[in-house]
Image: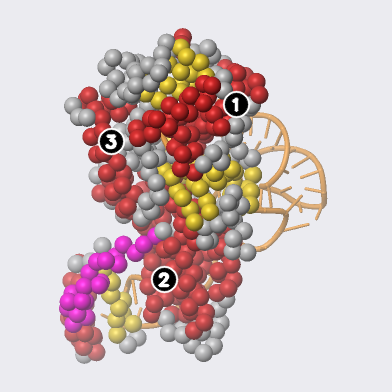
Amino acid sequence: MENQLFIYNTISRKKEKFESIIPQRVGMYVCGPTVYGDAHLGHARPAISFDVVFRYLQHLGYKVRYVRNITDVGHLENDSDSGEDKITKKARLEQLEPMEIVQYYVNRYHRDMEALNVLPPSIEPHASGHIIEQLEMIEKIFNNGYAYLSNGSVYFDVLKYNEKHQYGKLSGRQIEDLYEYTRQLQGQTEKKSAYDFALWKKANPEHIMRWNSRWSEGFPGWHLECSAMGTKYLGEYFDIHGGGLDLQFPHHECEIAQNIAANQTEGVKYWMHNNMITINGQKMSKSLKNFISLEELFSGQNNLLLKPYSPMTVRFFILQAHYRSPLDFSNEALSSSEKGFERLMNAVKTLEKIVPAQENTVDVENLRNSCYEAINDDLNTPILIANLFDGVKIINSIYDGKEKINQENLLIIKQIYNDFVFNILGLKDEAKNSVENQETLKNVVDLLLNIRLSAKQNKDFATSDKIRQELGKLGFEIKDKKDGFEWELKK
RNA sequence: GGUCUCAUAGCCGAGUGGUUAGGCACCGGUCUGCAAAACCGUCUACAGCGGUUCGAAUCCGCUUGAGACCUCCA
């Protein structure tokens, strides 16, 4: 029951039962960022979605090798007609070494991912560190007759490939459909047909990032790194390949073609694609310049933001939608996530305060089963969260004395919240490491509230209200209980 | 122009051929010296038009609208 995981496989367009190729082991490759700018909300989505996949597979007892690459060469820029690559352009602009730019943004990417509580992958290979592997792959493709040389550049021969294989299999396209609207690109004349793509690009004189090869001094094509690095670290056939929906075509389609052309295997068993984050109904992306960086989100420094949102608010916001649905950004939505997340965290804290009874009136088994059912159904985190909120009602009712829980079930429900909230969804209590744990401050606040309690007992409400009010101004929330009080510090 | 996806209450977002998703907001109640928190309750939707069906928001068709990909993109 607990490991009946079903995953929606893009290539079959169906939910399929997950069965790893090698028992108890999973190889997973996810397309990482191109490091020429700060990570934005859109980057958080695959990172978090596949972080949950990574966490859940481990929870199920799999030993997972998770590879997420860093793209630091090769991507041609949209508005540049010189065909220079993105990293190079930024470097010349700012008079820095290309690798200095790469390092700068990689560091910042790591910082943002850590804030979001995204676990680091097992291996994080750089495209620039795998030029040899990419050259070897081109060699294989070339020798198998699916590539041709033109002006020092090597192109993949899509028409040739399509004679025996189906180019467009992943994205459900027919090659004829592609023909009509293909844009006129620089270098088009070098290609035999419009949909051929570069495996190796000869570098222009001003192009700084370049490597020697038997064809020319140049750099690898845009789709090759994932094929080469995936194969190197996970083998020619591995379990899961993930990435954004926008990479489905042509990027992942080209990967499949390269894998078959080089190794006679598609390379991947389950293809998973996360949907986009939109803003005003339109995809958030660097090229559309409608993005909000994670740093801005956390600090509130962006005109689109009414206030800052904490990393866990952002994570919770993303998890409240299914990974294959589009998710629209809005301040209202983020704010509700913030409050909802707080409610969930409060219940988890309440759980620690519950004293078990002899009798039991709650059904925690049912709760646990519905949680597994949700996550097993193609990682349905919104349903999982809804179930956890049902549990919040149970927890609060117990704490209010309206329901009873025995020792055994209390341990189970604690386990459920620990597993699902922290280990699988990867949420964490952001207030945890703050003042509430600082002994001295805690004592001081308790002291004040004990004075207030005496004042209340003496019907000196002026004093008691003043204490509550002043503490409130400092961010403390006071909750009066039957025989005393509770408090917590709101950020 | 081609391929495809989606249209759910004030907002965000699941799901389903017949039974309450959930969160946030609002309103009412319990509790409280007053609050807060918590709990309970109210409101209760599936773009429009046809069709299939005992029954459709869920299946089919059409219309309208939105989006993605076809070009770097998470």
Can you say which quadrant of the picture contains the C terminus of chain A? Answer: bottom left
Three-letter code, disc 3: Val
Q: Using the image, determine if residue A35 lies above or below residue B41.
A: above
Residue sitting at 26 percent across and 33 percent down? A99
What residue span does the magenta drawing correspond to? A427-447
Residue sitting at 44 percent across and 68 percent down? A418
| Res A334 seen here | no
Image coordinates of residue A185 in percent, x first then y, are 44, 15
Q: Using the image, determine if residue A251 lies above or below residue A143.
A: below
Whether label 1 touches label 2, CB < 8 Å: no
Three-letter code, disc 1: Tyr
Judging from the image, what secondary structure is the residue with disc 3 in?
helix
**Residue wearing tag 1:** A167
Residues tagged by mark 1 and mark 3 found on one chain of the structure: yes
Whether label 3 touches label 2, CB < 8 Å: no
The tag on residue A347 is 2
The residues bearing labels 3 and 2 have C-alpha atoms spaced at a distance of 42 Å
The tag on residue A188 is none
The residues bearing labels 1 and 2 have C-alpha atoms spaced at a distance of 51 Å
Image coordinates of residue A341 in percent, x first then y, are 39, 61
Question: Magenta stretch: residue A405 in it?
Answer: no
Judging from the image, what secondary structure is the residue with disc 1 in?
loop
Sooner in the amino-acid sequence: mark 1 or mark 3: 3
Judging from the image, what secondary structure is the residue with disc 2 in?
helix
The residues bearing labels 1 and 3 have C-alpha atoms spaced at a distance of 33 Å
